[in-house]
Each structure stands twice: as structure tokens, then as C-alpha cells.
Image (tube, rainbow, N blue to C red):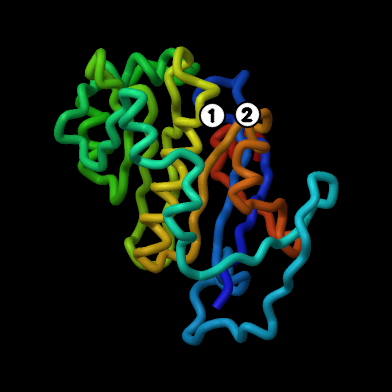
Amino acid sequence: MSILYHITTLPIPLHTPKIHSSLLILQSDPAMLLRGAILRPLNPSSVVRLKTTSSSLPQNVAVSARPPSRKSYSISDGDLESQGFILRRTPADLNLDDLNKVFVAVGFPKRDPDKIRVALDNTDALLWIEYEKTRRPVAFARATGDGVFNAIIWDVVVDPSFQGIGLGKAVMERLLEELLEKGITNIALYSEPRVLGFYRPMGFVADPDGIRGMVYSRKQRKKK
């Protein structure tokens, strides 16, 4: 079986009106996207494979159904450790005030720590990186979902002081691997348009077969 990575780009107003995001979707079966689950796997012969180019969108990228070999990590666990970074997969040692500071530093609104705690309690998978010298989080991402078909990745952030050294990619590679190992076939996330290029090298493409995501908008409802 092959897995198709899809991006659906759609400007979405968030809590702050000046910020717009795009909805990115990773899925293994086009028949499941916004159409419901099917009862049998997609015939491999029906999967379309196109070479990826930066200028040809929309497009589909076919990759192995199994996560790539760990040798394909952009930064190995050992290299991260040698640079003073510790990978964490549980919120046990995560200081929520320090995490909030990272959120604010990248432009997120400050969040109620109690609500962050509830969000983490309802998170299916998370991965964060602690800087050993300060014992503070410097990169973070988490995912929620039904544990079988669907997952949404949230809060992919890197402390501005540590951006540009591959920590964001390191977090995404490992979180994505964990979701795929669980057999989850549809994975989505929101992204500002200016960083869509960060996700494309991971296999995402735009608007498969013209399918676009939709998000509930209170503003749109008020117009009726």
C-alpha cells in the first residue's frame, strides 16, 4: 500500500484577525478525505504517482506505507544529545509556564496554563525537545485524534533563539512517524502560508483532486 501526502491550502481566520493559516492534510486514501471511511483498502494500481516539483501544484506524492528507516532522520537522536538537547515524549517534566513563553515568542496568544493542561491530557501523541542547560522546552508539537483513522497536529513551535538548526523538522519527523506507526491514515495540521515550504519536503502537496478543507467561521455565519 502507498501513502499519499496531501496539503489543502485554505486561508483561515484564527483568534487574531491579522493571522491566516492553511489547512494541510496527509492521508493514505483519497476516498477517505471528507467522504468518510471505506471498508476495504485502496487498490495499489489505482494510486497515482507524480514527481514532485516546487512549481507544479496540485500534485500527489507516493511514499512507503511504513515509516522510513531511522537513518533518514535529518538529525539523529545521538546528534541532538551531543548538542545538549533531550527528546521528550510525555508531558511529565514539561513546565507549562515555559511552554507558554515559547508560544508567545512565536506569536501565539498567551494561554491559560490550566487549559494547556487539559489540552495535553487529551493529546494522543506529543514530542518536545528540552535544552539541557536551561531545562526548558525549545521545540514542541502534539497531535489529537481518534487513534485509528484521523489525527490533527497542533502547536508546532520552536523557540526563536533555536530556530534554523533543524529542531522543528526533528520534532515533526518523529511525531509523524509515531502517528504512521499507529496506522493512522489521515493527518492534518494548520500552517501559516509563509511556512508551507517547511512541510513540502516531508511529502505534502496541495489540493488533491481539487478537494479543499473547510473550517467553521462565526464571521461567515453572521453574514447570512
Q: Looking at the figure, which quarter contains the C terminus?
A: top right
Task: Identify the amino acid type marked 1.
Answer: Leu
Q: In this orientation, which residue lies closer to the viewer: 79 or 89?
A: 79
- Which residue lies at the image location 57% right of the left edge and 53% below the top edge? 25
- Which residue lies at the image location 44% right of the left edge and 52% below the top edge? 176
Tally of numbered discs: 2
Residue hosting label 1: 14
- Which residue lies at the image location 39% right of the left edge and 57% below the top edge? 179
Percent across and percent down for residue 45 are 68, 85
- Which residue lies at the image location 67% right of the left edge and 37% below the top edge? 197
In the rendered view, does 127 fall on the left or right side of 157? left
Which quadrant of the structure image shows residue 196? top right
Residue hosting label 2: 20
Which quadrant of the structure image shows residue 61? bottom right
User: Are dots 1 and 2 in contact, CB under 8 Å?
Assistant: yes
Percent across and percent down for residue 215 are 57, 45
In the rendered view, does 17 fall on the left or right side of 180? right
Q: Which mark is residue 129?
A: none
Circle 2 sits in a helix, a strand or a loop, which is it? strand
Q: In this orientation, which residue lies closer to the viewer: 39 or 1?
A: 1
